[in-house]
Amino acid sequence: MRLHKKRSSLVMLATLAVAVLLLCGARNGPVSAGPGLFGLPSLIGADAQQVICPRCTFVNETVNWQILPRLAPFTLASGDGAPSQDTAVRLCHDTNALHVRFDATDIDIINNYTTCNSDIWNLETVEFFVAPGPETPTVYHELDQSPNPGAYFASLIHNPNDKCAGIVGNLMSCPTVGVSWATGRVSNGWWATIVADFDVLVNLTGDARGWHSDPRQFGEQLSVLNPPVDNEPVEVPILFEREGRAPIPKVWRANFYRIDAHANGTIEYSCLHSTLTNPACFHVPSRMVGLLLV
């Protein structure tokens, strides 16, 4: 679908208004692009929440996270209210990458994993799923970070069933080419940043290691599987063209998650946009929000 050309001037004015809002006072509350903004419900469906991803501002080559508003508070994956500890997400983009920051309140940080692509999701972890374009994706990137430096997880996921069954994945390299990771601990919890190059995020075909069954949910042995065949692409608004490389769309689908392990052995699963699952399942791409890059 293509946005009507007659809307271009309105889009420019709305983009300027959003930029002013981001710079002038809306620094602590959630930023959400409500229904009707830029006509996007026709692109991502009436049920999908929309959030704005502004341009990054850098200070000494580091993102100035303090001026960026947090997204809405997380809810439990089941949809039954708020988790016991807060998770704040901020995000922005430059011409090369998406930048995401999690700030997790945590009185008992529990995760003893130390290596890349280990099973960090069994304990304290934050996760980011993302796919280009407005449609509900069947292929998307999963990028997870634990509180421990070097203990992250990166995979391309094929999920044709919109649920935690029949998922296959293609693990990315260690270290992950095109993705930068950082994490640290503070007095009341921990933080993590994930910076993912657009060249990585628009590549939905994986690499030579091939697709394999994701063993996390089912304990299956790894088995080779051909990568999924791309459907006819949906025509979407482009943020900017790049000579010799794939263009960057304005609209993406994404969700943000946290696994919060407690000292008493319980675990809470929460999301920016609840997946409405119990037992918890994060792999419900139809519940991904729309990301509008401005």
Image (tube, helix red, strand yellow):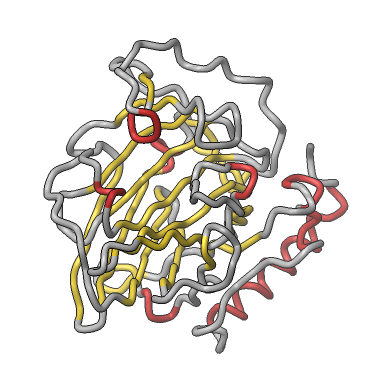
Count of numbered circles in the view = 0
State the residue in front, 28 or 17.
28
> In the figure, 261 relative to 105: above or below?
above
Q: Is residue 237 left or right of residue 191?
A: right
Residue displayed at 55% across by 82% down: 29
Residue displayed at 60% across by 35% down: 162
Q: Position of residue 251 (x, y in %)?
A: 63, 48
Q: Position of residue 45 (x, y in %)?
A: 76, 47
Q: Is residue 157 left or right of residue 110?
A: right
Residue displayed at 57% across by 84% down: 26
Residue displayed at 34% across by 13% down: 223
Q: Position of residue 140 (x, y in %)?
A: 49, 36
Split into 4 quadrants, where in the image is the C terminus?
A: bottom right
Name the quadrant containing residue 101. bottom left
Name the quadrant containing residue 241. top right
Split into 4 quadrants, where in the image is the N terminus?
A: top right
In the displayed orientation, state which residue is furthest to the bottom.
25
> In the figure, 254 relative to 29: above or below?
above
